[in-house]
Amino acid sequence: MSALSCTEDLFSNLLCCEDSEILSGDLPERSSDFESTDIEESIALFIENERKYVPGIISARKNQSESVDQAARQASVAWILKVQRYYGFQPLTAYLSVNYLDRFLYRHHLPEETNGWALQLLSTACLSLGC
């Protein structure tokens, strides 16, 4: 899962021969109405509310043989949260992204021999949908 990183050299792995100069320009100023602790509290509240209203999915997920191991899922969630903070997305974006990720993993099995690219693609898609 090391490819799921948000580093200073963000565009070093462009696959379609894009011009990284276009992508690495100055980022626009962003304003944040939330402090870091407010964001963490909001996400924790979202997760707690999710457990109250969707206990079936959570308990079934624990009992089902998992398509990805817990460490890979945690790495994906950590990446989603890192990107959310980096770009200043709202806490709801991270919450929805993780929710989509879990719901997809609950219903579908990812191929095992993909070296993590399928989970990376899924994480990116879930983050895009969450925006």
Image (cartoon, grey):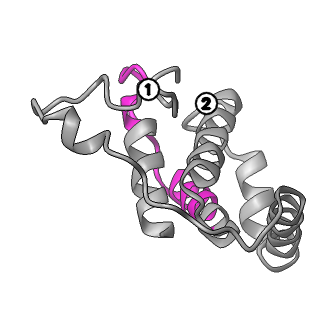
* Secondary structure of residue under mark 1: loop
Q: Where does label 2 land, which residue?
A: 72
Residue 22 % position (x, y): 20, 43
Q: Tags 2 and 1 in contact by the CB under 8 Å rule?
A: yes
Q: Looking at the image, is 29 positioned above or below residue 14?
A: below
Location of residue 45 (image quadrant): bottom right
Q: Residue furthest bottom?
A: 53
Residue 97 lies in the magenta-colored region: yes
Above or below, 110 against 56 in this view is above
Q: Residue reaching furthest left?
A: 17
Residue at 41%, 24% (x, y): give it: 9
Image side of residue 102 versus residue 119, left or right = right
Q: Which residues are magenta?
A: 96-118
Q: Position of residue 36 (x, y in %)?
A: 82, 56
Label 2 – label 1 distance at C-alpha: 8 Å
Residue at image x 63%, y 43%? 82
Report the amino acid beneath label 2.
Ala
- Residue 82 is a magenta residue: no
Residue 39 occupies which quadrant of the picture?
bottom right
Q: What residue do we see at 56% from left, 64% from top?
A: 30
Q: Quadrant of residue 11?
A: top left
Label 2 or label 1, whichever comes before in sequence order: 2
Which residue is disc 1 drawn over? 116
Answer left or right for 85 relative to 41.
Answer: left
Marker disc for residue 102: none
Chief SS of the magenta region: helix
Residue 84 in the image: x percent, y percent?
60, 54
Label 1 sits on what residue type? Gly
